[in-house]
Image (spheres, helix red, strand yellow):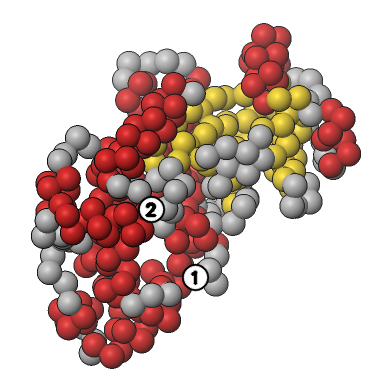
Amino acid sequence: MDVVSDAISAVHLGHPWSHRLRTSESWCARLDPYDGAGFYVVLKGRCWLLTDSSAPLPLGVGDAVLLPHGTGHVIADFPVDAAAAKKKAVPFEQWLVETESRTQSDSCETEVLCGKYWLDCSRMHPLMAELPEVVHLPSRVGSHLELRAAIDLLAGELDEMRPGSCVALPSLLDLLLVYMIRAWMTEAPSGAWPRVLGDPVVAAALRALHSDPAAPWSNDRLAAEAGVSRPTLARRFTTLVGRPPMAYLTWWRVIRAATLLRDTSDTLATIAGRVGYGSPYALSHAFQREFGTTPGRYRAQAAGRSADAETD
């Protein structure tokens, strides 16, 4: 896999939730912080988004917003401030029920796609951790065509339940998350990880490590894969990524093991082999050093988090 795919897969839990909101009345709703990421896409009308640490953000038709860290926020049809939010905002779930009970789709003034992704944030890849509190992707002619196409497909699936929708919806939602992160990387070239993946040497080394983390990598072998000398790779990789290549590999192997513990029923011995450890004992020792708990306890705790995400 590639770095972005791995970074998302490492934290993704359960099935994402989505809804198409239509309303003709004034509204102001509050969503408390949660372990996950949320998004909004304005299809009709205009609205404003407010977090505790930002000014009201105006959103127009076609604008997309990703809140990758589950930040609590208020969304409203007017430029809400903290005082107005405290006075007027109702819980999001309550607003959703009230809106559904009284709005006719053919007379709505505001139409918004919204949704949630449940994430395990216990050991987030630095690419995901670097995402800002609010990723605003304004609608501009000719920009982010893949994202726009995904939005159109998702809106169509939410219009009515058609054959295959139960498969199409979660797949389109996962695609939407990928495209929003891609769009942010394009819009934020000064960010650390856009620079990392834009460096041909470091990007080649990361592709190699993520494609086969169980391989017997060494600094010399990785440098050859990237087409540079060992000192050059060490310098560029450490400067951009923040840790030496072999230290990153050790960390990523343990994170990958955690994902397999969470998402599969494989034995610890099988997982150890898949991530490059010679024995379950060696993996367990490295895992406990990174996570502060044993693989068995982590798997039990992760099962509880995944069950919560599936039923929420």
Would residue 14 be visible to someone looking at this image? no
Q: Which residue corresponds to the image point at 31% horizontal and 20% vertical from the top-left?
A: 164
Q: Which mark is residue 220?
A: none
Mark 2: few/some/many CA within 10 Å (<14, 14-19, 20+): few
Horizontal side, residue 103 vs residue 244: left or right: right
Q: Is residue 13 or residue 173 the one in the foreground?
A: 13
Q: Position of residue 250 (x, y in %)?
A: 27, 66
**Quadrant in the picture for residue 72:** top right
Disc 2: which residue: 292
Quarter holding the N terminus is bottom left
Residue type, mark 1 in image: Ala
Disc 1: which residue: 192
Q: Position of residue 209 (x, y in %)?
A: 23, 66
Ranked by sequence position, the earlier of labels 2 and 1 is 1
Q: Which residue corresponds to the image point at 32% horizontal and 25% vertical from the top-left?
A: 167
Q: Is residue 278 or residue 142 the one in the foreground?
A: 278
Q: Position of residue 58 (x, y in %)?
A: 74, 45
Using the numbered discs, state the Cα–Cα distance from disc 2 to disc 1 in whole angstroms.
28 Å
Residue type, mark 2 in image: Gly
Q: Position of residue 174 (x, y in %)?
A: 40, 39
Would residue 148 be visible to someone looking at this image? yes
Q: Is residue 105 or residue 8 the one in the foreground?
A: 8
Q: Which residue corresponds to the image point at 15% horizontal and 41% vertical from the top-left?
A: 267
Which residue is situated farthest in the top direction here? 101
**Quadrant in the picture for residue 244:** bottom left
Q: Which residue corresponds to the image point at 16% horizontal and 72% vertical from the top-left?
A: 217
